[in-house]
Amino acid sequence: MLAGGRTQSGKTAFKAVAGLVGKRVGVATIVATNLVSGRDQLTPKITSFLKSVPEDKRPPVMAYAGGVKNKEKMRACIQQSGIIVLSDTAAQITKVAEMIAFCRGNAMEVRDFMLLIDEADHFYRSYDDRLKLEQAMAHFKGNPQAQNKAKGTFSPPRLTLEISATLLPIFLQMRRKKNSVEGSNIFIVRPTKEDYNSGEDLEPYGRTFDQDNKSIEGTDQFLEPGALCKKNMWGADSTGDQENASIKAFQGLFQSALNSLMEPIADGATGGGGGGGGSGG
């Protein structure tokens, strides 16, 4: 399954709702995302989204971390049908796969899990899956070809949902591998105009409108390449009279502050020289 939508348009809801469904049916939810920073940002987002859910129906949420204590915490999270967020490294994916296999093999009532791949376009990096990350993810998905290369076998997730604001790389990879997905299994987030601003809402500086809310031709103001530089204190005439006045005021304050900082240094250098002369005399 695939889920797409514009950047910052609410795709976190997919991960949180999937985690709730997993909790309800008794399966863990594994969320892989891009970079450690992405993992650390996504974990509190999911936690915050689930705050309104009653505690007895809310899945535990944790970010992957190494160490014995965290290993036990991760095992408990899987057993409680919780949500584990990890980053895009082969090591983390392999460790979580090993933990799921361990829970399955030790009769801990863990058999299935769901896999959510956030920023999914970042997980397709080569044409032939030669990278360790791609191989680890293929094994995690239960790819038969990857199973032959890996030690042992690994039962695939009950559901795989790939989420991205850029679905095109995923479609291209699917085409290369001659895979397909049903249209009913593709979800698109379309935010309303009232609560979302995109690149289409950016307007040139200085644009003015008439009484019919139509832009007046010739009022747009643009900066030329190199117009903003250190020499003019990153200010340009094209930013308008009011802004120029503010910029000039800022330049004056900045120069005054700089002068006040430099005066003690200059005085100290002068005084030190005079003192040295007096001592010598």
Image (tube, rainbow, N blue to C red):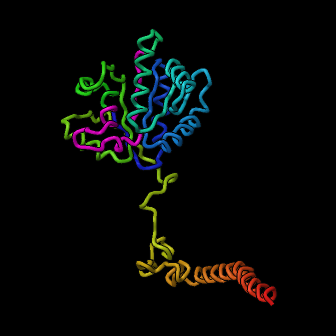
Depth check: 135 or 4 in front?
135
Residue 97 sits in which quadrant? Answer: top left
Residue in the image at 58% along x and 79% along y? 243
Q: Is residue 16 above or below residue 227?
A: above
Corner quadrant of residue 141: top left
Residue closer to the observer: 225 or 130: 130
- Relative to residue 275, is residue 78 drawn left or right? left
Question: Exactly how many numbered labels are in the figure?
Answer: 0
> Quick check: can you spot residue 59?
no
Q: Quadrant of the N terminus?
A: top left
x then y, percent, for residue 148: 24, 23
Is the residue 34 above or below the residue 211 in the image?
above
Farthest-out residue, top: 107
35, above or below 72, in the image? below
Region of the chain picked out in magenta, as a range: 111-137
Residue 242 shows in this picture: yes
Q: Quadrant of the C terminus?
A: bottom right
Toward the bottom, the furthest residue is 281
Q: Is residue 134 magenta?
A: yes
Q: Is residue 77 left or right of residue 262?
A: left
Q: Position of residue 58 (x, y in %)?
A: 57, 25
Q: Nearer the viewer, residue 188 or 222?
A: 222
Q: Nearer the viewer, residue 82 or 202?
A: 82
> Residue 128 in magenta?
yes
- Picture coordinates of residue 67 (x, y %)? 54, 28
Q: Residue furthest front?
A: 281
The image quadrant that residue 107 belongs to is: top left
Question: Residue drawn at (26%, 43%), measured in percent from left and top?
Answer: 126
Question: Residue 241, percent across and down?
Answer: 57, 84
